[in-house]
Amino acid sequence: MDDDPAQRPNFAHALTNLGGQLGILDRHREKLAAWREAVAVWRALASGDEALYGETYRAARSFLQQRLQQQGFDDEAINLDL
């Protein structure tokens, strides 16, 4: 990833979209990996600017937790250290 901070939100969106496309292809482990990385990017952004990115981070984290539970990763969903 280009380390340009201004591009990080675009990168997080791209990872989320990638995860969706991987899911369509039944590549579920890769889908979850992309979504985990997207949440990590949003977390970093929110830690720097809670007012701007906090809500998006919380929504992405909640989305990932739900998808982890659907895939049977209940422990990870419950203990998602974000």
Image (tube, grey):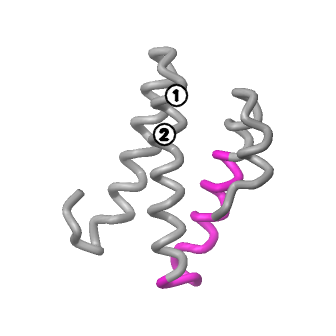
List x then y, in percent, for residue 77: 74, 46
Label 2, secondary structure: give it.
helix
| Image quarter hosting the C terminus | bottom right
Residue 5 to residue 63: above or below: below
Q: Nearer the viewer, residue 39 or 56?
A: 39
Q: Is residue 51 above or below residue 43?
A: below
- Secondary structure under the numbered disc 1 in the rendered image: helix
User: Which residue is depicted at the point 28% across and 73% down?
Assistant: 6
Against 29, residue 57 (above or below) is below
12, 29: nearer the viewer: 29
Judged by its main secondary structure, the magenta piece is helix
Q: Position of residue 34 (x, y in %)?
A: 45, 41
Whether 13 is among the magenta residues is no
x and y percentages locating residue 38 in the rendered image = 47, 53
Residue at numbered disc 2: 33
Q: Residue flagged by tag 2: what amino acid is it? A: Ala
Q: What residue does disc 1 label? A: 29
Q: What span is colored magenta in the figure?
A: 48-64
Q: Are marks 2 and 1 in contact (CB under 8 Å)?
A: yes
As rendered, which of 8 and 68 lies closer to the eye? 68
* Residue at image point 43% right, 39% down: 17
Q: Residues within 10 Å of mark 1 (few under 14, many from 20)?
A: few
List the single residue furthest toward the top: 26
Locate the N terminus by quadrant.
bottom left
Amino acid carrying mark 1 in the image: Arg
* 10 Å crowding of disc 2: few (<14), some (14-19), many (20+): some
Residue 17 shows which numbered tag?
none
How far separated are the C-alphas under marks 2 and 1?
6 Å
Image mark count: 2
* Residue 50 vertical position relative to residue 20 in the rendered view, above or below: below
